[in-house]
Image (cartoon, grey):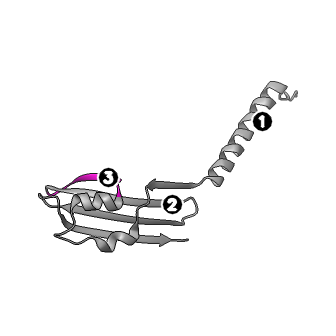
Amino acid sequence: MKIDCLDSVHISGLLRKILGGLAMAMFLSASGCATVGHEFPTGQVSSIKIGETTQNDIYTTFGNPWRTGLDNGLKTWTYGSYFYTLFGDGSSEDLVIKFDKRGVVASFVFNSSKRSK
């Protein structure tokens, strides 16, 4: 019985696939994190006053919101920073502000978390 040997072309292609897979695995291990949103001055959240702080005040303090939307007819601005790693560590901070029809803060919620595996 004759056993065929792999020729150099097949070995080269196989080696290229193996090295490509290893390179991809190394890249994912080194950069296995994701950041979404953008940082905002969390220390200024306590300055927000329901019924007093205006949309312009919020813009001046926090800048452009990361997301905007509507909730039951009220304009919402969201500021958020979310960081996650491949290994389960992560942190998040988000501020959601609702404005009444006059452009004054109707309500807001601030949450933060730090998770480590």
Assess disc 3: are there few (<14), some (14-19) or many (≥20) residues with their C-alpha within 10 Å of its C-alpha: few
Tell me where residue 101 sits by quadrant: bottom left
**Can the viewer see residue 7?**
no
The residue that label 1 is drawn on is 15
Assess disc 2: are there few (<14), some (14-19) or many (≥20) residues with their C-alpha within 10 Å of its C-alpha: some
Picture disc at residue 45: none
Indicate which label's residue lies in the foreground, 2 or 3.
Answer: 3
Residue depicted at x 17% and y 63%: 104
Kind of residue indicated by mark 2: Tyr
Which percent across, then down, holds residue 74?
16, 57
Kind of residue indicated by mark 1: Leu
Say whether disc 2 or disc 3 marks the residue closer to the N-terminus.
Answer: 3
Magenta stretch bounds = 63-72
- In this view, the residue farthest toward the right is 2
Say whether disc 3 or disc 1 marks the residue closer to the N-terminus.
Answer: 1
Picture disc at residue 84: 2
The residue that label 3 is drawn on is 67
CB atoms at circles 2 and 3 under 8 Å apart? no
